[in-house]
Image (cartoon, grey):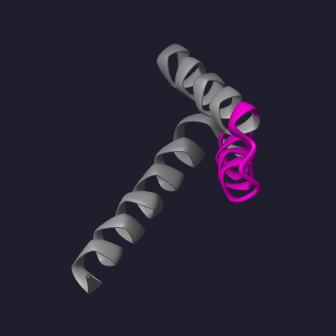
Amino acid sequence: MLTWHTVLALVELNVGLLLQARLGVVGLALLLAVGVGVRARRDDLAVAAAVLATLLMLQA
């Protein structure tokens, strides 16, 4: 159980660092929007932010 949480925390940290390195403040804002959308159970916000982040990462 603890190992699973540790792996998820490391993945979250690495995704945040990658988005920040490649997209700067926009990447962090999109990551925040995904997190807020998931916590608020707003699937449309979370999916839209994730798709936009993916498209921007492909272009960067």
> Image quadrant of residue 11?
bottom left
Q: Residue at x 29, y 68 (%)?
A: 7
User: With respect to residue 21, does 5 lie above or below?
Assistant: below
In the rendered image, residue 40, in percent from the top left (x then y), is placed at 76, 55
Dominant secondary structure, magenta:
helix
Q: Is residue 38 above or below residue 55?
A: below
Identified at 41% across, 56% down, the residue is: 14
- Residue toward you, 56 or 21: 56
Q: Is residue 28 left or right of residue 17?
A: right
Q: Position of residue 46 (x, y in %)?
A: 67, 39
Q: Residue at x 53, y 54 (%)?
A: 16
Q: Residue furthest top?
A: 59
Report how many numbered discs are placed on residues in the image.
0
Going by the image, does 44 lie left or right of 18?
right
Q: Is residue 53 magenta?
A: no
Q: Residue 50: x percent and y percent?
A: 60, 33
The image shows residue 27 at horizontal and vertical percentages of 65, 40
- Residue 29 falls inside the magenta stretch: yes
Q: Is residue 47 left or right of residue 40?
A: left
Tell me if residue 1 comes above or below residue 56 in the rendering. below
Asked if residue 15 is positioned above or below residue 5 in the image, the reply reads: above
The stretch in magenta equals 26-44
Query: Where, quadrant-wise, is the N terminus in this rendering?
Result: bottom left
Residue placed farthest to the bottom in the image?
Answer: 2
Most foreground residue, 35 or 57: 35
